[in-house]
Image: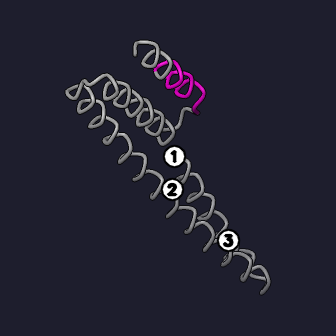
Amino acid sequence: MKLKLTALLMGALALGLSAQVNATEHHTAQALEHSAMATAHGQDGHADQLLKHAEEGLKHAEAAEKEHAEAHVHMTDAIKHLKEAIDHAKKGHADVGTQHTEEAMKHMRQSIGQ
């Protein structure tokens, strides 16, 4: 069982190191790591450690879920602004189209946490 735990921890560590630095992926990596540790402890019959790591994994999973939802909303808004920019550009309204592309870029940056 120690070998399983070591293998799971090494896999989780590798996943954590390979993840990009943004917060969403950090929370996802942490959720995976704690879930792997909960699984290993559960297989060894350690309910108290399973509980501890499952609770911590849940916190990170919920944080990742929230961040993904916020990113999705911002990208949806960016798409709306780009469509408006296209409509205004077709009408020759470069000034209004520019305002919409600027807003689109703001939302795109917010979707990736910048």
Mark nearer the N terminus (3 vs 1): 3
Residue 84 position by quadrant: bottom right
Residue at x-position 66% and y-position 76%: 96
Tell me the element at label 2: helix
Q: In the orientation shown, which residue stands out farthest toward the bottom? A: 91
Mark nearer the N terminus (2 vs 3): 2
Tell me the element at label 1: loop
18 drawn magenta: yes
Three-letter code for the amino acid on which mark 2 is drawn: Ala
Three-letter code for the amino acid on which mark 1 is drawn: Gly
Q: Residues within 10 Å of mark 3 (few under 14, many from 20)?
A: many
* Above-or-below relation of 29 to 4: below
Q: Which mark is residue 113?
A: 1
Which residue has dot 3 on it?
A: 82
Q: Tell whether 63 sits left or right of 114.
A: left
Which residue has dot 2 on it?
A: 71
Q: In the orientation shown, which residue stands out farthest toward the left? A: 48
73 drawn magenta: no
User: Of residues 69 and 87, which is closer to you in this image?
Assistant: 69
Tell me the element at label 3: helix
